[in-house]
Each structure stands twice: as structure tokens, then as C-alpha cells.
Amino acid sequence: MFAEVIVDVSANSLDKIFDYKCPENCTIFLGQRVLLPFGKRTIEGYVLNLKESTNLDLSQVKEIIKPLDEQPLILPEMFTLISELKKEYNLRIIDILHLIVPSQIRSGKVKQQTIRNCFLTEYALSHISELKSNSKNQIAACAYLKNKPQESIVTLNKNFGSATINKLIEKGFIDFVTENVNRTPLTEVENNINTEFKPTEKQQLAIQKILSKQNLFNLLFGVTGSGKTEVYMQVIKEALKNNQTAIMLVPEISLTPKTVKQFRSRFGNLVAVLHSGLSDGEKFDEWFRLYNGEAKIAVGARSAIFAPLKNLGAIIIDEEHDSSYQSENNPRYETVTVAKLRAKYNNCPLVLGSATPTIETFYNAQKQSYNLITLDERINKRPLPKMDIVDMCHEFREGNTSLFSNHLLNEMSKAVNNSEQIMLFLNRRGYSSFQMCRECGFLAKCSDCDVSLVYHKEDNLLKCHYCGKKFKTLTKCPNCQKSSIKLGNTGTEKIEQELSELFPNTKVFRMDNDTTTTKSSHAKILGEFEKTKPAILVGTQMIAKGHDFPSVTLVGILDADLSLFYSDFKANEKTFQLVTQVAGRAGRAEKEGKVVLQTFFPKHYVYNFCSSYDYLRFYNKEINLRETASFPPFSKIIRILVTAEEDEPAKNLTHELFLKCKDLRVNNKSDFYFLEAMRSPHAKIKRKYRYQVLMRIKENKPELVNQIFEIANVINSKVSVFVEVNPQNLS
């Protein structure tokens, strides 16, 4: 018997199948991890196929040393997924396998945690009198165990000393059984199963349409607070009834504790959590709970789409519009694409939920590629919050140079006086976005990345938000030696400080990447905020979606223009989504909500649609612009990204790739809308120089995309080349 194996090395030159002979002394399974001789090394690999013979010279075929796992870690479904993702995104097979089998599972460093539970033996019961009278701890330990069926050895060692317990084990007085113990994340979330909620008539119609499977792909288009989560839970409940499993995705780790709480209250211990914020032990245990069928619902962020669940009955992607569902690092993939592949394989419904779907998703729904299911009113019949748009140019002319308009301050004072809660959104963390010299214009930049450093007053440091490197704060300019150091735009840290001064008797919480560095920090901040009244929560995008606080009556959007003027064809769409989502946090219970949006461009059409929550009018305008300019969904954007530690090799290879793409365009003129090579907007990140070849081609041209993949399949030890299809971020 022979095995076709992929070796566990991420290199283009090794992204191919190698034949190995199966050892006679053990059975090798499809999908199993194995130890292999490879050149002069011994490395790991994965069995992708088994066959009776090989076309190679038998003297050249080496033998597998041994299997590394008792069971194959790759489910049969995943072989189809590997094939499809390699074709769709030009990914290396081993990189896809790393998504399917996380490092905590394949490294061998993380093990199942066990505990020894001790009990008193029959022998002890008839021989306790033989213990010497001065062996007080031994006698006490036996007396303690006499009243307990079992006790952990950790507790016994703590109470009576490890020497005492070991002596009793030697004498045969104590024996033990070994038990596996799961390291369960979010243990503060209760597993008490609540009674069922009765869906509303509109929710019931949505559930029935999804379960009918007239179309496997569904867009649940529901305004904020319309009860989409209850629809998700009812669909998953039906899957469980049919002995099936489910995946529930949320865009931010900060939303996971809330989602886990909701799902555990309904489905108890059948829920497992998968996201990057867990410890290695927790990831290991939760992955195997899903793999072994102990847990049947995977809740998590993007990576949970690869959960090792068999017989999927539902896949849910909440806030499907969120950019975090697209991986921007190798391996690059779109979560929705993976979800579609898994839904097709399992013949199960995929539900994409959003109040502000991506233009591409809504376009698919309009074309009837997806079922369009609408929930157009809040579950409690409450109106969406009134949105006031404040012209900050007018504020400046009136002498107000602070980041808070007079209108927002007045509304905040009212909310505080009424013991209500406030959420303030600013999509910029830190105290100030840069430090620069007023005299010569020197800008403090990261030595490893071509980006400005952000000043963090709390640590009195300059930090790079791309590589994490830290630098001393400038007191004088290193270029001209003058002390004219200016701080740039305000960040969340400075807002927090100013709010504490403006409202000294009100608790101010801050939620951004700097305050949520530990795995429990999201839940802790949100939990404390929920219990505190009055209170103010200031934060970045992580406060904008999914949260449901009944006492939040006011939302302030401090600088709505931040996302509006990016050099990105999706800038208008992202701004509309962000404003609508953060606005939806207000007035979700009985009290009326209000939103104050501050902008220097109050007449911009995006804000007009935002203020009326009119997604359909926004979509109609945006889709016309996209069609006129031939942007997605009417085209496909492809970026070949070239990175290297030296500038010249990256630049030269980019030029070569560009010339090959130009030749390709000559033979496919009508299929190309745009082709250009350039230095990336962020020309250097983490010590690597970055160049790109950007092109826009006709949609549904898979042969052309494959030809571009072939051009980009470069084997070069000094330069890395990646291809991105419809990337979220071109910087």
C-alpha cells in the first residue's frame, strides 16, 4: 500500500504530492498525520490518498516512519474543501491544511489535561487500624476519604501533603482513576437551558423559508434589533433535532461572550467556542469536543468556519458585511466562499445576516442567487433612533475647537442626569494619531513599517499599530533638534481622559485593541458597563456591532468622515455600514434612542441615507456607480502583492510580473478594465518592502484568473508573492 502525502512545509516548491510506502506493522488512514523521512530531515506530513501501487521506481520510494495520531484529523469533507480553495484562491495545500487543523492540534505540544481522582480501597477499610498513631496526616486523609466517593489528588495533596498521599498509594490504602478534564473557555457564562422563546409571525416565516431549502443560500436582511439572533437559534434547533450540527460566526471576538451566553442558555454544553483569543489548551479541548461530537455547535470568529463538524445542518454568518470575514494574511480567503462550499457539500442552509449587507451580497439577492428574507421592524416595535447630523465646520466657526459639538455635550448631560448609558464611537485608538515637528515637518515613523507612530499617553510611548514596535516619545525633533512637537488627531485614549474631566462623577469605559489584550477583557469591560448607570463607553469598531444594552439611549459618532475619504471604492459602503451599525446600539429597549453624528460634510449623500436608515436607496445609488465604473460585483479585482526584505528584488520582480500581465492583456483586451504596477500605499510593513500589480477584470472569467495565478506562481527564496481576489484593503 502506498500513500500520497503533502509535507508540512510552506513553500511553493514543495506544494506537491509525494509517494511513500505504508509500513507493514501499522495501518495508515486517509487524512492521518504521519512522520516521514524527507531528504536528510524527518518531518511531518498528511496522507491525502491511499493506493495499491505507484508509478515511481520502488527503490526511490521511502517508507512512512509512523502515524502521529490514532485517528485521521482531516474529515472527508475537507478533501473537497482543499481542492476547491486551492482552485479559488491559488493557496498552497499545506496552508489550507493549517486552517483545517490548527497549530494547537498538530504541534503535539498541547495535550489533553487529566486529573487523578482518588478513593479509599477495600483493603484500607479493613487495615486502617494498622496505621501508626503518629501518622496523623495519613489517618486524617483516610478519614476524609471515608466520607467521599472520590476526591482529586490536587485537593488531597493540598490538604494533607503530597508525601502523605503518595505513601498511602504505596501501601494500597488509596487508588485512583484518571479522568480527562476540558479547559472550558468563558466559564463565567452559565449553561442553564432557558425555556423557548416564541418567534413572531415574521420570524416564523423567515425560519420556514430558510428550512425549506428552496435555495441553500439566504440573506436575512433585518434592521438592527429585529430579532435575527432568534431566527438563527431556531434554525440551529431544527438542525439538532435532525441529529445535525451547526456553525455560528460573529465578526468580532468582543461579540463572542454575548453570543456564547445566548447560545449556552438555549443549548447548554452542546456549544463550543473557537477564536484566536483562547488559550492553547482551550483551543485544543474545544476543537476535539467538536471533532468527537461532544459539542455540536461551533460559535466563533472567522476561523470557526473550518470547525471539524460532521453532518452540518446550518451555517450562520452574522453581520456578514464585516471586513473581518476576509483574511488579509496568508492564507487569504473569504469566509462566505468557504461557507458556501461547506453548505453545498452538506446540503444545508447558509444564512447571511445583516442590516447593511455588502453591495455584492444584496446584488446576489436581487438576482435571486440568494433567498432574500426581510425583517423590517424591531422586535419590540420601537422606532429606530432619531439621528441628528451636526456640522463641525459650523462648530469651528462658532469657536468650538473640541471634538465634542455643543449639541452632543447637551445630549450627554441629559442622558447622564437620567442615569442612562452612552456609547461614543471613534475609529482611532491611542491618544494622538501621530507626532510631528512644526518647524521642519519631521513625522515620527516606525523603523520597520512605512507608517506614522501613534502616541499613547497612558504608556508615554509611540507605538506602531502594524508591527507592535514601541519607541520613546519625542520631546524634541531628531531632525532639527527643535522642541516644536505637535500631536496629531485625537484617539480613544484622549477622548476617555476628556470625558473623565467633563463628567467626573460618571464612569467612563474604553474599549479598543489597547484595553482588550487579555482573553477575558472584552467580557469584563462589557459586563461592567452593562451594570453601571450612568456610564459612558468610548471605543473603536468593536463597539459598533452586535451589542444590546437596554439602557443605552445615546450614541455619538465623533468623526464620521474617517472612513469616508479612503482611496477605496468601498469607502461609501463602509461608512454607511459603520454609521448604521453603531447607530443601532441606541434605543433598543423601552426608552427612545438618539444618535448624534458629527461631520465636516453634512450634505454628503451617504449621511442623508444614514439618517433615514434607507439601505435600499443607498444600494440603488451605489450599484449604479459600481456598474458605470465597472467595479465589483460587475468585475473582479485581483492584486498580486510582492514583498521582500530588500527593496530592489521586490521592485524588479513586480516589474517582471507586470510585463507578463501586460502580455496577457494583449490577448484578452476586452476582459481587462484596468492594469497597473505600483508601490503599495504602505510601502513597508514589518521590515518588508511592498509592491503590487493591480488589475480589474470581467467577472466570471475563471480561465483568465487561472492564468494570472500561473504568472504569480514564482519560486524565489528572497521574495514572497501572494494573489488576492477582491481584497478588502488595498493599502
Image (cartoon, rainbow, N blue to C red):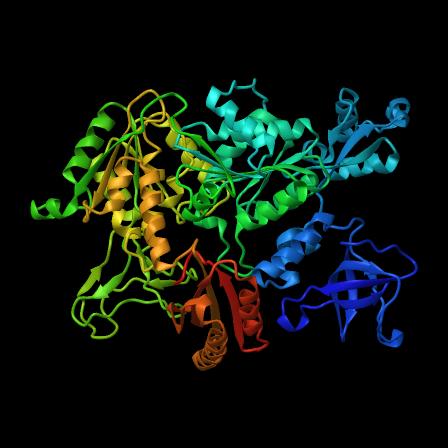
Depth check, front residue: 722 or 438: 722
Residue 296, how many percent across, how many down? 66, 35
Residue 377 horizontal side relative to residue 3, left or right = left
Residues 38 and 250: in front is 250
Q: Is residue 193 visible?
A: yes
Q: Nearer the viewer, residue 107 or 178?
A: 107
**Total numbered labels placed on residues in the image:** 0
Where is the N terminus found, in terms of image quarters?
bottom right
Q: Position of residue 50 (x, y in %)?
A: 82, 59
Residue at left 74%, top 62%?
Answer: 45
Residue 126, percent from left and from top: 90, 22
Quarter assignment of residue 40: bottom right
**Residue reaching furthest right?**
24
Please, is residue 108 above or below residue 512 in the view?
Answer: below
Give the camera-side residue of 546 and 378.
Answer: 378
- Residue displayed at 69% across by 55% down: 106
Judge whether 203 appears above or below 346 on screen.
Answer: above
Tell me what residue is drawn at x 57 percent, y 75 percent.
714
